[in-house]
Amino acid sequence: MYDIQPGPYVGRFRLRTGRVVDITSRFPFRDLATLLGLGSKATLLRHDATSALGGPGLMDLIALAFVREAERIAGQGLAKGYKQTTVARPPYAGVPAVTAHLNAHAGRADRLVTTAKRLTADIALNRLVASAHRKLCQLTYQDKQLEVRLRQLTPVFRNVNGREGGARQLPSLPARYREIHDLSRLLLDNRTVLPAGTALAGVGVLFNMTKIWENYVGRWLTTRQPEAVVHNQYPIPLIDIGPPRRARADFVVERGGRPVAVYDAKYRPWKERPNTAELYQLFTYASRLCVDRAVLVCPGTEALSRQMTMGTVLVEIIAIPLEDSAAQDG
């Protein structure tokens, strides 16, 4: 018996017993690629995401996109770079390494230590891709042929350390790696430790849709208001006298060096009447920032808006239709 607590997650995990649990979106979006930040690369996902028992799930589609890109990269050959290596046994290559020689052999004349640059595929970019591949290989898929294609890619990354995950910031990115780089980031940056517990050691890739929705709203705000400055997780002091307490607004729009509006992203269905806690939160943020506009942003299938006033604060509840905003973003 397992107790599964609902949360803002979409993805897949496997229990120790082998049972696979697929978590789909609470919203009827045809494609979650827009929310997940794939942007124009959503064309890689050519099928609608459904529950795992009814067809390909979200993880199947992401894995399929990854396999296609990885096979293309493998056909062209992995990117390579030079890596500094220390040679302590013959044949010696490169130039003598004086410091290493002194440390290892105390300067003995019959021993030698050199350093040389060797061309290798074990670079940060390939480590990132190999780590994502390793993660995908641990999951279960409805399409068994997809599992075979993933396993067939294992020799490609045999000489790449896929356990490190690659550097977070890469100095340069070849054009042919852009799509697989974004897919790898998607798999690794949004992973969670769920499910947790000593009895649950299954492999999971779960996306925190609350955070992903906040990122999407941030991009939407920046596109809609290019002349303004949009701050995310803006600190707001709540206490004037006494122990300091701070809250953080999801987004604050600033013009001319001063805040003019506050936005709160909620990953829930739009409704005309927000609950009392949401109204308190918006009014508090607006009052502390001395702004007269507070907006609650929810996902939706069509553009919806409702306005109300709380004292001098105009509160607006809006829904963003994902397909329309994705088209506006290009």
Image: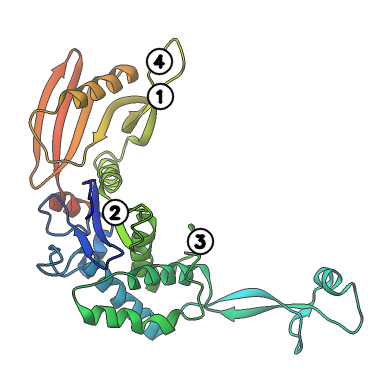
Of the image marks 1 and 4, the number of the one nearer the N terminus:
4
Q: Nearer the viewer, residue 36 or 256?
A: 36
Question: Which SS class for mark 1?
Answer: strand
The x, y position of residue 145, in whole percent, is 23, 82
Of the image marks 2 and 4, the number of the one nearer the N terminus:
2
Give the residue displayed 19% in from the left and 77% down from the top: 143
Circle 4 residues within 10 Å: few <14, some 14–19, many ≥20? few
Q: Quadrant of residue 15?
A: bottom left
Q: Which mark is residue 325?
A: none
For residue 5, above or below residue 202: above
Question: Which SS class for mark 3?
Answer: loop
Q: Quadrant of residue 304?
A: top left
Question: What is the total number of numbered labels drawn onto the structure image?
Answer: 4
- Residue 198 visible to an observer of this rendering: yes
- Residue at label 4? 239
Question: Which SS class for mark 2?
Answer: strand
Q: Please identify, in this view, whether the residue under mark 3 or under mark 4 is nearer the observer.
A: 4
Distance CA(mark 3)–CA(mark 2): 21 Å
Distance CA(mark 1)–CA(mark 2): 27 Å
